[in-house]
């Protein structure tokens, strides 16, 4: 059993949560858990439970309250964490596995010094432990006056650090939603307003950034008669002057991976060559940019990785190599592309470039805009810009890619897409890898890499069942593993049972809506013409049999030839897989999603065609690049 203090005070076994009713035993428990393992004096406990209006028999009443609390513990099987009476007071023992407050502090401590990207991931996992208004069901004025603000301050420090990391990495759009929320919930915390102004300015919203400053200034003058702190005033002046305050975040800027610059040689004699602090006049300037996103704990796909690296490293210098990675949403296309780019990047003197071909609002990036983004990133001098590896992510239409390949003559490109992109391969050649689900042993290896060999080794059969429930989809596996990572006391078997009762709806993370299998699949359907999306839902809800043209025609109520064309389009969209000769099949995870999302329209998909470029749509559903 586990106590949850970071929100309404509750008890959970990892599946069910019991929120304790507002009562004196609830207040007593909160006072003890806020200081876990420490002796809390009886005087303090009486103040927590009764405040200044203590009964004449407060000592006996406190003992009665402790007895009631012990009965609650016994009801939920928490004998090993019972209240202990010691000299001068009472104590409750807890650790990071039994109290979310200690787990939160453990994650924050672990994050420090782990490198910014791992630190960000760990801090967001810590923030996910907060479940709502702190101690909302605890009737104690003393705790809400003295303890709640102190605990809230711990969360504010983490929120501030997360904002700093996101801004340092130029992810201004990603952090805007969080900053809008915290500046309104905590209007007195000026650092959040400073971060919000900076994020707005870097995304080209200067007017809104200045309006935020005026809001803060007006509130401070009205309530306290003071001006904003000096840092905020300097930021306002910089925005008014139009100063360069960091990279402008357009929402689709390329991310560059340049090879590390080698140190200049030093000559032993004063007359010999260049010194270490100078660069030769003919030396190319270093290519700016941040590293490509890392792919944590990448496992499996050994044959594809070997083939990809061979294609990217053994090509002729004068040719432009194209590799297409296609497959279902969440199947791991982007992760494989990034992993291969890291392995082969040393063979490209101009470095690597990641360019997402869908915008932050989910719409397909027009070919002209994509080409302009690439032109800004490539060197401007003639003869340069070759020998670069492009990772073109989430392509919707072949025409988005063609001008980019022309601009990158002599380089190579890894293209990821849910579509097959046969038209691109027909005009530009290249290799095609259609990715399926991981093999069971690969899924087991991924869980082991993320959770650790000891935890998976203790429940090997449960780990295999969890992988099966996740459909061996990398994104689903990582979501389930993240849930287990943030709940070290949760058994893998219990997690699998919990997921099984509501698949795929429970394959989601509350602190990041992008990490959601149902949202990802909803977005995949949203890209399709409505009749084609409706056909997918109908076929998914049908009996679990190989989908032949005849069976699909019966389900969809259309001629067999039309049904076959429909299935071909769903195959190209990554929503069906090839089965036995003359048949198709739908992955079980997609089928479970289709059963939940029952067809909402009755139109018959009698006329279906691939969407035109201007019709391609996508909601903002994509998970972080390294996990796609």
Image (spheres, rainbow, N blue to C red):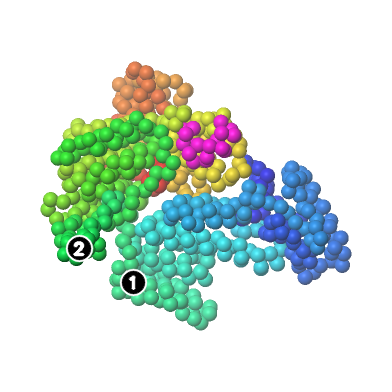
In what element is the residue under mark 2? loop
Q: Which residues are magenta?
A: 443-460
Quarter of the image where one finds residue 261 = bottom left
In what element is the residue under mark 1? helix
Which residue, given by chain and number where applicable, does mark 2 sit on?
A: 269
- Residue at point 79%, 61% (across, down): 89
- Residue at point 22%, 61% (across, down): 268
Q: Is residue 186 visible?
A: yes
Count of marks placed on residues: 2
Check residue 459 for magenta coloring: yes
- Residue at point 27%, 50% (across, down): 259
Along the line of sight, the residue nearer the viewer: 170 or 118: 118
Look at the picture and state if 420 lies above or below 285: above
Rendered-image quadrant of the C terminus: top left
As drawn, the label of residue 19 is none
Look at the picture and state if 232 lies above or below 444: below
- The overriding secondary structure of the stretch rendered in magenta is helix
């Amino acid at each position: 059993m586990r106590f949850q203090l970071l929100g309404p005070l509750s008890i959970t076994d990892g599946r069910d949560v019991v929120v304790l009713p507002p009562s004196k035993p609830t207040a007593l428990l909160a006072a003890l858990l806020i200081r876990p393992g420490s002796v809390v004096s009886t005087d303090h406990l009486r103040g927590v439970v009764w405040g200044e209006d203590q009964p004449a028999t407060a000592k006996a009443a406190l003992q009665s309250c402790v007895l009631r609390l012990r009965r609650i513990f016994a009801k939920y099987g928490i004998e090993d964490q019972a209240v202990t009476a010691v000299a001068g007071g009472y104590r409750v023992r807890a650790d990071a596995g039994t109290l979310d407050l200690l787990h939160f502090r453990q994650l924050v401590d672990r994050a420090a010094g782990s490198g910014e990207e791992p630190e960000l991931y760990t801090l967001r996992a810590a923030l996910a432990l907060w479940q709502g208004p702190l101690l909302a069901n605890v009737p104690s004025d003393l705790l809400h006056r003295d303890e709640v603000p102190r605990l809230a301050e711990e969360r504010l420090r983490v929120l501030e650090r997360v904002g700093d990391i996101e801004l340092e990495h130029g992810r201004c759009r990603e952090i805007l939603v969080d900053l809008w929320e915290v500046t309104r919930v905590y209007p007195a915390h000026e650092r959040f307003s400073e971060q919000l102004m900076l994020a707005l300015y870097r995304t080209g919203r200067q007017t809104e950034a200045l309006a935020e400053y005026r809001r803060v200034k007006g509130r401070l003058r009205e309530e306290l008669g003071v001006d904003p702190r000096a840092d905020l005033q300097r930021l306002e002046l910089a925005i008014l002057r139009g100063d360069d305050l960091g990279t402008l975040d357009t929402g689709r800027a390329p991310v560059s991976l340049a090879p590390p610059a080698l140190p200049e040689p030093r000559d032993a004699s004063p007359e010999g060559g260049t010194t270490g602090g100078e660069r030769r006049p003919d030396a190319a300037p270093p290519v700016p940019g941040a590293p490509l996103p890392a792919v944590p704990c990448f496992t499996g796909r050994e044959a594809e990785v070997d083939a990809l690296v061979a294609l990217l490293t053994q090509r002729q210098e004068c040719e432009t190599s194209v590799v297409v990675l296609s497959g279902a949403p969440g199947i791991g296309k982007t992760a494989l592309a990034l992993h291969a780019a890291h392995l082969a990047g040393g063979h490209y003197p101009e470095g690597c470039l990641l360019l997402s071909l869908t915008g932050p609002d989910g719409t397909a990036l027009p070919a002209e805009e994509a080409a302009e983004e690439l032109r800004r990133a490539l060197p401007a001098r003639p003869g340069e810009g070759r020998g670069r590896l492009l990772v073109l992510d989430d392509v919707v239409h072949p025409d988005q890619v063609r001008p980019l390949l022309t601009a990158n003559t002599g380089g190579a490109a890894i293209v990821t897409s849910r579509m097959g992109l046969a038209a691109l391969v027909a005009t530009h050649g290249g290799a095609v890898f259609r990715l399926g689900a991981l093999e069971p042993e690969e899924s087991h290896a991924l869980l082991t890499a993320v959770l650790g060999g000891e935890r998976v080794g203790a429940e090997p059969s449960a780990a295999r069942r969890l992988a099966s429930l996740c459909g061996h989809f990398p994104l689903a596996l990582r979501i389930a593993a993240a849930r287990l990572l943030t709940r070290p006391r949760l058994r893998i078997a219990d997690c699998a049972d919990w997921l099984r009762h509501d698949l795929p709806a429970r394959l989601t993370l509350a602190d990041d809506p992008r990490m959601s299998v149902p949202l990802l699949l909803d977005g995949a359907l949203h890209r399709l013409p409505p009749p084609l999306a409706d056909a997918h839902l109908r076929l998914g809800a049908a009996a679990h049999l190989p989908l032949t043209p005849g069976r699909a025609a019966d389900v969809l109520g259309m001629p067999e030839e039309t049904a076959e064309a429909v299935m071909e389009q769903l195959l190209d969209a990554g929503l069906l897989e090839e089965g036995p000769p003359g048949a198709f099949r739908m992955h079980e995870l997609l089928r479970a999603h289709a059963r939940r999302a029952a067809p909402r329209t009755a139109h018959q998909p009698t006329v279906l065609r691939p969407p035109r470029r201007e019709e391609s749509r996508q909601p903002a559903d994509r998970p972080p690049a390294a996990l796609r």
